[in-house]
Image (cartoon, rainbow, N blue to C red):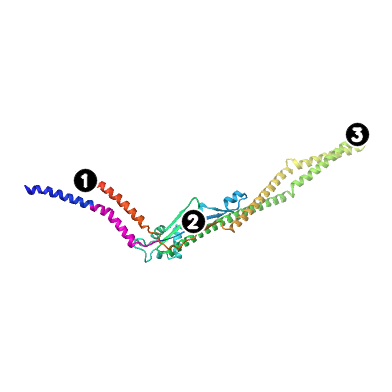
Amino acid sequence: MAPSSFVPASRSKNRRIFAKLWQIRLPLAVIVLPVLLVSIYYALIAAPIYVSQSSFVVRVSAPPSSSSFGNLLQNSGITRSQDDTFSAQEYIRSRDALQRMSDDLPIRTYFDRPEADVLARFPAPWQTGLFEELYRYFSQRVQVIHNDTTGITVLKTSAFRPEDAYEMNQKLIELGSERLSKMNERARGDAIRFAATEVENAERRMIDAQKAITLFRNKELMIDPGQNSVSLVELMSRLSAELAASRASLAETRETAPDSSSIPFITSRISALEEQLKLEQQKVAGTDGSIAPRIADYEGLILQREFSNKALLSALDSLKTARADARRQQLYLEVVVPANRPDKAELPTAIRNITIVLLVTSIGYLLAWLLLTAIRDHSN
Protein backbone atom coordinates (compact mmCIF):
# COMPACT_ATOMS: atom_id res chain seq x y z
CA MET A 1 0.00 0.00 0.00
CA ALA A 2 2.87 2.41 0.85
CA PRO A 3 4.78 1.96 -2.45
CA SER A 4 1.65 2.60 -4.53
CA SER A 5 0.94 5.84 -2.63
CA PHE A 6 4.57 6.96 -3.05
CA VAL A 7 4.52 6.82 -6.89
CA PRO A 8 2.12 9.78 -7.52
CA ALA A 9 4.11 11.97 -5.13
CA SER A 10 7.36 11.08 -6.92
CA ARG A 11 5.84 11.86 -10.33
CA SER A 12 4.52 15.19 -9.09
CA LYS A 13 7.96 16.11 -7.78
CA ASN A 14 9.58 15.23 -11.11
CA ARG A 15 7.09 17.40 -12.95
CA ARG A 16 7.86 20.35 -10.70
CA ILE A 17 11.59 19.89 -11.26
CA PHE A 18 11.05 19.64 -15.04
CA ALA A 19 8.91 22.77 -15.00
CA LYS A 20 11.59 24.71 -13.12
CA LEU A 21 14.28 23.49 -15.50
CA TRP A 22 12.09 24.44 -18.48
CA GLN A 23 11.49 27.88 -17.01
CA ILE A 24 15.25 28.33 -16.78
CA ARG A 25 16.21 26.76 -20.13
CA LEU A 26 13.60 28.60 -22.20
CA PRO A 27 14.94 32.13 -21.56
CA LEU A 28 18.47 30.79 -21.82
CA ALA A 29 17.74 29.30 -25.24
CA VAL A 30 15.60 32.11 -26.57
CA ILE A 31 17.19 35.25 -25.08
CA VAL A 32 20.53 34.75 -23.41
CA LEU A 33 22.16 32.43 -25.91
CA PRO A 34 21.40 34.51 -29.05
CA VAL A 35 22.43 37.75 -27.33
CA LEU A 36 25.60 36.06 -26.06
CA LEU A 37 26.47 34.73 -29.52
CA VAL A 38 25.84 38.10 -31.17
CA SER A 39 27.89 39.87 -28.49
CA ILE A 40 30.79 37.45 -28.97
CA TYR A 41 30.61 37.97 -32.74
CA TYR A 42 30.74 41.76 -32.51
CA ALA A 43 33.32 41.76 -29.74
CA LEU A 44 35.76 39.17 -31.08
CA ILE A 45 34.96 38.34 -34.72
CA ALA A 46 33.30 41.24 -36.55
CA ALA A 47 35.72 43.24 -38.67
CA PRO A 48 35.60 47.05 -38.66
CA ILE A 49 34.00 48.58 -41.75
CA TYR A 50 34.94 52.07 -42.96
CA VAL A 51 32.47 54.38 -44.71
CA SER A 52 33.44 57.03 -47.25
CA GLN A 53 30.85 59.71 -47.96
CA SER A 54 30.42 62.29 -50.73
CA SER A 55 27.58 64.43 -52.03
CA PHE A 56 26.72 65.75 -55.46
CA VAL A 57 24.00 67.49 -57.43
CA VAL A 58 23.06 67.13 -61.10
CA ARG A 59 22.65 70.46 -62.86
CA VAL A 60 21.43 71.42 -66.29
CA SER A 61 22.53 74.56 -68.11
CA ALA A 62 19.73 76.67 -69.59
CA PRO A 63 19.62 79.97 -71.49
CA PRO A 64 19.52 82.93 -69.08
CA SER A 65 16.09 84.43 -68.52
CA SER A 66 15.45 87.98 -69.68
CA SER A 67 13.86 88.99 -66.38
CA SER A 68 15.76 89.58 -63.18
CA PHE A 69 13.39 87.26 -61.31
CA GLY A 70 14.07 84.52 -63.84
CA ASN A 71 17.78 85.09 -63.45
CA LEU A 72 17.42 84.81 -59.70
CA LEU A 73 15.54 81.53 -59.99
CA GLN A 74 17.80 80.01 -62.62
CA ASN A 75 20.99 81.22 -60.94
CA SER A 76 22.59 82.58 -64.10
CA GLY A 77 21.25 79.88 -66.35
CA ILE A 78 22.05 76.90 -64.09
CA THR A 79 19.17 74.84 -62.72
CA ARG A 80 18.77 71.53 -60.95
CA SER A 81 17.60 68.52 -62.91
CA GLN A 82 15.47 66.18 -60.80
CA ASP A 83 14.90 63.47 -63.40
CA ASP A 84 18.55 63.33 -64.43
CA THR A 85 19.54 63.10 -60.76
CA PHE A 86 17.48 59.93 -60.47
CA SER A 87 19.12 58.64 -63.66
CA ALA A 88 22.57 59.17 -62.14
CA GLN A 89 21.49 57.47 -58.91
CA GLU A 90 20.11 54.44 -60.70
CA TYR A 91 23.25 54.09 -62.77
CA ILE A 92 25.52 54.29 -59.71
CA ARG A 93 23.58 51.35 -58.24
CA SER A 94 23.46 49.43 -61.51
CA ARG A 95 25.21 46.25 -62.61
CA ASP A 96 26.93 48.13 -65.41
CA ALA A 97 28.52 50.51 -62.91
CA LEU A 98 29.74 47.51 -60.89
CA GLN A 99 31.14 45.86 -64.01
CA ARG A 100 32.97 48.99 -65.15
CA MET A 101 34.28 49.65 -61.67
CA SER A 102 35.50 46.04 -61.49
CA ASP A 103 37.48 46.63 -64.69
CA ASP A 104 39.43 49.46 -63.04
CA LEU A 105 39.46 48.45 -59.37
CA PRO A 106 39.98 45.04 -57.69
CA ILE A 107 36.49 45.03 -56.19
CA ARG A 108 36.54 41.35 -55.27
CA THR A 109 39.81 41.89 -53.43
CA TYR A 110 38.30 44.86 -51.58
CA PHE A 111 35.45 42.68 -50.35
CA ASP A 112 37.72 39.74 -49.42
CA ARG A 113 40.45 41.40 -47.38
CA PRO A 114 42.32 39.23 -44.84
CA GLU A 115 40.97 41.31 -41.97
CA ALA A 116 37.36 40.73 -43.08
CA ASP A 117 35.40 38.29 -40.94
CA VAL A 118 33.83 35.16 -42.32
CA LEU A 119 30.25 36.49 -42.21
CA ALA A 120 30.84 39.97 -43.64
CA ARG A 121 33.28 39.14 -46.43
CA PHE A 122 32.52 38.19 -50.02
CA PRO A 123 32.19 35.48 -50.98
CA ALA A 124 30.75 33.96 -47.84
CA PRO A 125 31.38 30.24 -47.20
CA TRP A 126 27.98 29.35 -48.67
CA GLN A 127 28.44 31.48 -51.81
CA THR A 128 30.11 30.56 -55.11
CA GLY A 129 31.25 34.05 -56.12
CA LEU A 130 28.85 34.59 -59.03
CA PHE A 131 28.49 38.10 -60.42
CA GLU A 132 24.86 38.29 -59.31
CA GLU A 133 25.94 37.43 -55.75
CA LEU A 134 28.62 40.11 -56.04
CA TYR A 135 26.02 42.61 -57.19
CA ARG A 136 23.77 41.87 -54.20
CA TYR A 137 26.76 42.30 -51.89
CA PHE A 138 27.75 45.49 -53.73
CA SER A 139 24.22 46.85 -53.21
CA GLN A 140 24.72 46.43 -49.46
CA ARG A 141 28.03 48.30 -49.59
CA VAL A 142 26.70 51.27 -51.62
CA GLN A 143 24.04 53.60 -50.27
CA VAL A 144 22.50 56.51 -52.22
CA ILE A 145 20.37 59.04 -50.31
CA HIS A 146 18.57 61.86 -52.13
CA ASN A 147 17.20 65.01 -50.51
CA ASP A 148 14.17 66.24 -52.46
CA THR A 149 14.31 69.67 -50.83
CA THR A 150 17.92 70.57 -51.61
CA GLY A 151 18.38 68.27 -54.59
CA ILE A 152 21.65 67.00 -53.08
CA THR A 153 22.45 63.29 -53.29
CA VAL A 154 24.67 61.63 -50.67
CA LEU A 155 26.75 58.63 -51.73
CA LYS A 156 28.12 56.26 -49.08
CA THR A 157 30.49 53.38 -49.80
CA SER A 158 31.76 50.94 -47.19
CA ALA A 159 34.73 48.57 -47.19
CA PHE A 160 37.13 46.88 -44.80
CA ARG A 161 39.87 49.44 -45.46
CA PRO A 162 39.56 53.24 -45.59
CA GLU A 163 41.36 53.55 -48.93
CA ASP A 164 39.08 50.92 -50.48
CA ALA A 165 35.91 52.79 -49.49
CA TYR A 166 37.46 56.06 -50.69
CA GLU A 167 38.45 54.69 -54.10
CA MET A 168 35.04 53.09 -54.60
CA ASN A 169 33.31 56.37 -53.82
CA GLN A 170 35.51 58.36 -56.19
CA LYS A 171 35.07 55.83 -58.98
CA LEU A 172 31.29 55.79 -58.68
CA ILE A 173 31.19 59.60 -58.84
CA GLU A 174 33.36 59.43 -61.96
CA LEU A 175 31.12 56.81 -63.56
CA GLY A 176 28.01 58.87 -62.80
CA SER A 177 29.59 61.91 -64.43
CA GLU A 178 30.55 59.86 -67.50
CA ARG A 179 27.00 58.57 -67.79
CA LEU A 180 25.65 62.13 -67.81
CA SER A 181 28.23 63.07 -70.46
CA LYS A 182 26.99 60.23 -72.66
CA MET A 183 23.42 61.39 -72.14
CA ASN A 184 24.59 64.86 -73.22
CA GLU A 185 26.24 63.52 -76.35
CA ARG A 186 23.18 61.52 -77.34
CA ALA A 187 20.81 64.43 -76.74
CA ARG A 188 23.06 66.82 -78.66
CA GLY A 189 23.46 64.35 -81.52
CA ASP A 190 19.72 63.79 -81.75
CA ALA A 191 19.03 67.54 -81.73
CA ILE A 192 21.61 68.26 -84.45
CA ARG A 193 20.44 65.36 -86.60
CA PHE A 194 16.83 66.45 -86.31
CA ALA A 195 17.69 70.08 -87.14
CA ALA A 196 19.84 69.00 -90.10
CA THR A 197 17.01 66.83 -91.40
CA GLU A 198 14.63 69.78 -91.18
CA VAL A 199 17.11 71.92 -93.12
CA GLU A 200 17.39 69.28 -95.84
CA ASN A 201 13.60 69.01 -96.12
CA ALA A 202 13.23 72.79 -96.27
CA GLU A 203 15.92 73.04 -98.95
CA ARG A 204 14.18 70.34 -100.96
CA ARG A 205 10.84 72.16 -100.72
CA MET A 206 12.54 75.42 -101.71
CA ILE A 207 14.12 73.81 -104.78
CA ASP A 208 10.82 72.20 -105.77
CA ALA A 209 9.02 75.54 -105.47
CA GLN A 210 11.62 77.26 -107.65
CA LYS A 211 11.41 74.47 -110.23
CA ALA A 212 7.63 74.84 -110.34
CA ILE A 213 7.98 78.58 -111.04
CA THR A 214 10.52 77.91 -113.81
CA LEU A 215 8.26 75.32 -115.43
CA PHE A 216 5.35 77.74 -115.28
CA ARG A 217 7.36 80.49 -116.97
CA ASN A 218 8.58 78.14 -119.71
CA LYS A 219 5.07 76.86 -120.32
CA GLU A 220 3.29 80.21 -120.35
CA LEU A 221 6.17 82.09 -122.02
CA MET A 222 6.04 84.92 -119.51
CA ILE A 223 8.26 85.90 -116.60
CA ASP A 224 5.61 87.49 -114.40
CA PRO A 225 1.90 87.31 -115.25
CA GLY A 226 1.29 90.15 -112.84
CA GLN A 227 3.57 92.46 -114.78
CA ASN A 228 1.93 91.32 -118.00
CA SER A 229 -1.48 92.13 -116.57
CA VAL A 230 -0.26 95.61 -115.67
CA SER A 231 0.82 96.13 -119.27
CA LEU A 232 -2.55 94.91 -120.50
CA VAL A 233 -4.38 97.23 -118.14
CA GLU A 234 -2.28 100.16 -119.31
CA LEU A 235 -3.00 99.21 -122.93
CA MET A 236 -6.72 98.98 -122.18
CA SER A 237 -6.58 102.39 -120.55
CA ARG A 238 -5.00 103.90 -123.65
CA LEU A 239 -7.52 102.16 -125.91
CA SER A 240 -10.38 103.39 -123.75
CA ALA A 241 -9.00 106.93 -123.91
CA GLU A 242 -8.59 106.76 -127.68
CA LEU A 243 -12.08 105.27 -128.02
CA ALA A 244 -13.56 108.06 -125.94
CA ALA A 245 -11.70 110.68 -127.99
CA SER A 246 -12.83 109.11 -131.27
CA ARG A 247 -16.46 109.01 -130.14
CA ALA A 248 -16.27 112.62 -129.08
CA SER A 249 -14.71 113.54 -132.42
CA LEU A 250 -17.45 111.64 -134.29
CA ALA A 251 -20.19 113.42 -132.36
CA GLU A 252 -18.60 116.79 -132.96
CA THR A 253 -18.12 116.12 -136.68
CA ARG A 254 -21.71 114.94 -137.13
CA GLU A 255 -22.90 118.09 -135.43
CA THR A 256 -20.71 120.59 -137.27
CA ALA A 257 -20.28 118.87 -140.64
CA PRO A 258 -22.80 116.07 -141.20
CA ASP A 259 -21.64 115.54 -144.75
CA SER A 260 -17.92 115.36 -143.90
CA SER A 261 -15.95 112.62 -145.61
CA SER A 262 -14.06 111.88 -142.35
CA ILE A 263 -17.13 110.42 -140.66
CA PRO A 264 -16.71 106.93 -142.18
CA PHE A 265 -13.04 106.97 -141.23
CA ILE A 266 -13.83 107.94 -137.65
CA THR A 267 -16.58 105.34 -137.49
CA SER A 268 -14.21 102.67 -138.74
CA ARG A 269 -11.59 103.70 -136.18
CA ILE A 270 -14.16 103.51 -133.39
CA SER A 271 -15.13 99.99 -134.44
CA ALA A 272 -11.47 98.94 -134.54
CA LEU A 273 -10.84 100.39 -131.10
CA GLU A 274 -13.91 98.68 -129.67
CA GLU A 275 -12.82 95.38 -131.15
CA GLN A 276 -9.28 95.78 -129.84
CA LEU A 277 -10.52 96.78 -126.39
CA LYS A 278 -12.84 93.79 -126.26
CA LEU A 279 -9.99 91.52 -127.26
CA GLU A 280 -7.70 92.90 -124.56
CA GLN A 281 -10.44 92.57 -121.96
CA GLN A 282 -10.84 88.92 -122.89
CA LYS A 283 -7.11 88.44 -122.42
CA VAL A 284 -7.35 89.77 -118.88
CA ALA A 285 -10.58 88.20 -117.64
CA GLY A 286 -11.91 85.97 -120.36
CA THR A 287 -12.84 82.35 -120.05
CA ASP A 288 -10.26 80.68 -122.27
CA GLY A 289 -6.61 81.66 -122.32
CA SER A 290 -7.06 84.72 -120.10
CA ILE A 291 -4.32 85.92 -117.82
CA ALA A 292 -6.38 85.97 -114.60
CA PRO A 293 -6.11 82.20 -113.88
CA ARG A 294 -2.42 82.36 -114.72
CA ILE A 295 -1.94 85.16 -112.23
CA ALA A 296 -3.66 83.04 -109.55
CA ASP A 297 -1.48 80.03 -110.34
CA TYR A 298 1.67 82.13 -110.39
CA GLU A 299 0.85 83.86 -107.11
CA GLY A 300 0.25 80.44 -105.54
CA LEU A 301 3.69 79.32 -106.68
CA ILE A 302 5.28 82.52 -105.38
CA LEU A 303 3.51 82.10 -102.03
CA GLN A 304 4.71 78.51 -101.80
CA ARG A 305 8.27 79.66 -102.47
CA GLU A 306 8.00 82.31 -99.76
CA PHE A 307 6.74 79.76 -97.25
CA SER A 308 9.56 77.41 -98.21
CA ASN A 309 12.07 80.22 -97.81
CA LYS A 310 10.76 81.09 -94.34
CA ALA A 311 10.81 77.42 -93.35
CA LEU A 312 14.39 77.15 -94.57
CA LEU A 313 15.47 80.21 -92.58
CA SER A 314 13.75 78.83 -89.47
CA ALA A 315 15.39 75.42 -89.93
CA LEU A 316 18.79 77.08 -90.35
CA ASP A 317 18.25 79.03 -87.13
CA SER A 318 17.29 75.81 -85.33
CA LEU A 319 20.40 74.08 -86.63
CA LYS A 320 22.54 77.00 -85.51
CA THR A 321 20.96 76.88 -82.05
CA ALA A 322 21.45 73.11 -81.82
CA ARG A 323 25.11 73.45 -82.72
CA ALA A 324 25.53 76.25 -80.20
CA ASP A 325 23.95 74.09 -77.50
CA ALA A 326 26.25 71.24 -78.50
CA ARG A 327 29.28 73.37 -77.67
CA ARG A 328 28.31 73.62 -74.03
CA GLN A 329 27.64 70.84 -71.55
CA GLN A 330 23.94 70.75 -70.75
CA LEU A 331 24.04 68.11 -67.99
CA TYR A 332 26.84 67.76 -65.53
CA LEU A 333 27.45 66.28 -62.11
CA GLU A 334 28.72 68.84 -59.63
CA VAL A 335 30.43 67.45 -56.53
CA VAL A 336 29.29 69.36 -53.46
CA VAL A 337 31.42 67.48 -50.91
CA PRO A 338 34.24 65.26 -52.21
CA ALA A 339 34.74 61.75 -50.92
CA ASN A 340 36.57 61.53 -47.59
CA ARG A 341 39.16 59.00 -46.47
CA PRO A 342 37.72 57.73 -43.15
CA ASP A 343 40.05 57.21 -40.22
CA LYS A 344 37.49 55.56 -37.94
CA ALA A 345 35.20 52.60 -38.58
CA GLU A 346 31.49 53.41 -38.54
CA LEU A 347 30.27 49.86 -38.96
CA PRO A 348 29.13 47.54 -37.60
CA THR A 349 26.92 49.28 -35.06
CA ALA A 350 27.37 46.61 -32.39
CA ILE A 351 25.32 48.14 -29.57
CA ARG A 352 22.36 48.85 -31.82
CA ASN A 353 22.41 45.37 -33.34
CA ILE A 354 22.74 43.67 -29.95
CA THR A 355 19.83 45.75 -28.67
CA ILE A 356 17.73 44.72 -31.65
CA VAL A 357 18.55 41.05 -31.05
CA LEU A 358 17.66 41.43 -27.38
CA LEU A 359 14.30 43.01 -28.20
CA VAL A 360 13.46 40.43 -30.85
CA THR A 361 14.39 37.47 -28.65
CA SER A 362 12.51 38.93 -25.69
CA ILE A 363 9.39 39.25 -27.81
CA GLY A 364 9.91 35.69 -29.04
CA TYR A 365 10.30 34.43 -25.48
CA LEU A 366 7.14 36.25 -24.43
CA LEU A 367 5.17 34.70 -27.27
CA ALA A 368 6.57 31.23 -26.49
CA TRP A 369 5.76 31.60 -22.78
CA LEU A 370 2.21 32.67 -23.56
CA LEU A 371 1.79 29.74 -25.93
CA LEU A 372 3.11 27.19 -23.42
CA THR A 373 0.99 28.65 -20.66
CA ALA A 374 -2.10 28.36 -22.81
CA ILE A 375 -1.26 24.76 -23.69
CA ARG A 376 -0.68 23.85 -20.03
CA ASP A 377 -3.89 25.48 -18.90
CA HIS A 378 -5.76 23.68 -21.64
CA SER A 379 -4.29 20.30 -20.65
CA ASN A 380 -5.10 20.85 -16.95
User: Can residue 274 be seen at all in this image of the molecule?
Assistant: yes
- Image quarter for residue 260? top right
Residue span colored magenta: 24-49
Local secondary structure at mark 3? helix
| Foreground tag (1 vs 3) | 1
Separation of residues labelled 1 and 3 (CA atoms): 150 Å
Q: Earlier in the sequence, mark 1 or mark 3?
A: 3
> On screen, 171 above or below 243?
below
Give the percent coordinates (x, y) of residue 112.
Answer: 38, 64
- Residue denoted by label 1: 376
Tell me if mark 2 has few (under 14), some (14-19) or many (20+) residues whose alpha carbon lies within 10 angstroms of its own.
Answer: many
- Residue denoted by label 2: 88
Q: Residue at x 30, y 52 (%)?
A: 361
Type of amino acid at the residue the image marks with label 1: Arg
Give the percent coordinates (x, y) of residue 75.
Answer: 57, 53
Type of amino acid at the residue the image marks with label 3: Arg
Tell me if mark 3 has few (under 14), some (14-19) or many (20+) residues whose alpha carbon lies within 10 angstroms of its own.
Answer: some
Is residue 80 left or right of 136 when viewed as pictured? right
- Image quarter for residue 36? bottom left
Give the percent coordinates (x, y) of residue 195.
Answer: 60, 54
Separation of residues labelled 2 and 1 (CA atoms): 60 Å
| Foreground tag (2 vs 1) | 1
- Residue denoted by label 3: 254
37 magenta-colored: yes
Q: Earlier in the sequence, mark 2 or mark 3?
A: 2
- Image quarter for residue 118? bottom left
Type of amino acid at the residue the image marks with label 2: Ala
Tell me if mark 1 has few (under 14), some (14-19) or many (20+) residues whose alpha carbon lies within 10 angstroms of its own.
Answer: few
97 or 218, nearer to the observer? 97
Local secondary structure at mark 2? helix
Dots 1, 3 in contact, CB < 8 A:
no
